Image (cartoon, coloured by chain):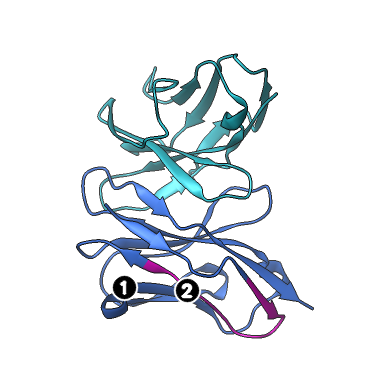
Amino acid sequence: EPEVTQTPSHQVTQMGQEVILRCVPISNHLYFYWYRQILGQKVEFLVSFYNNEISEKSEIFDDQFSVERPDGSNFTLKIRSTKLEDSAMYFCASAEREGTEAFFGQGTRLTVV
Amino acid sequence: AQSVTQPDIHITVSEGASLELRCNYSYGATPYLFWYVQSPGQGLQLLLKYFSGDTLVQGIKGFEAEFKRSQSSFNLRKPSVHWSDAAEYFCAVGARNRDDKIIFGKGTRLHILP
């Protein structure tokens, strides 16, 4: 069964460093998303991406964040100058088309020290 | 914009007992509705979804949910819980537009007593 794959599963980084979280969505999907879950809290929407551009972003997704689909298969989330409060589980998701369910990856646990 | 409320932060039931987890949504039209389950340290697994049609939907692991438009609710039920059902459960609502982003509730943590 096709699945969304995220790497790495766990990343530790020093405050102020840049990190790139990687996702390989399901191959025929057209809609892509990043979500964040701070430990013990709810899953929060960060950004949606369609047709090679951001279609919507939340207030969390400020200039520190960026997304890219560099090669037609990967979907990345870059966090510049990480802060302690960026420590969270980051989930990537993809959907085939409008009106279909989103499939989530297993997440990347980011720890900023 | 859509939103979802899960009024119960924690629910404790005995193994073998029935379960109902509450979810209320806010959206101007008929939404897409989902229930996801998350075991500790794990990702999100889709239990079931409602898009249209029959308002009682069946999911995996013996779960079902009923969409009630008049109450703006999508409660999750299971007739007899198992110890392995202990997890965090998230209700989510999606909008019927191009973006289709999903908004999650705060979750309900289910505890099972032996």
Establish if B80 lies above or below A43: below
> Contact, CB < 8 Å: mark 2 with mark 1?
no
Residue visible at 38% across and 69% down in the picture: B24
Helix, strand or loop at mark 2: loop
- Residue A28 in sight from this viewpoint: no
Query: CA–CA distance between discs 2 and 1?
Result: 11 Å
* Chain to which mark 1 belongs: B
| Frontmost residue, A39 versus A85 | A85
Expressed as whole percent of the image width and height from the top left, the position of residue B60 reads: 52, 68
Q: Earlier in the sequence, mark 2 or mark 1?
A: 2
How packed mark 2 is, by other alpha carbons closer than 10 Å (few <14, some 14-19, many 20 or more), is some
Q: Which chain is cyan?
A: A
To the question of a shared chain for discs 2 and 1, the answer is yes
- The type of residue carrying mark 2 is Arg
Residue visible at 55% across and 15% down in the picture: A18
Q: Quadrant of residue A51?
A: top left
B26 vs A90, left or right, is: left
Residue pointed to by mark 2: B22
Helix, strand or loop at mark 1: loop
Establish if A18 lies above or below A21: above
Residue pointed to by mark 1: B72
Expressed as whole percent of the image width and height from the top left, the position of residue B6 reads: 47, 66
Residue visible at 65% across and 56% down in the picture: B39
Please state, as top left, top right, bottom left or bottom right, where the C terminus of chain A lies in the image: top right
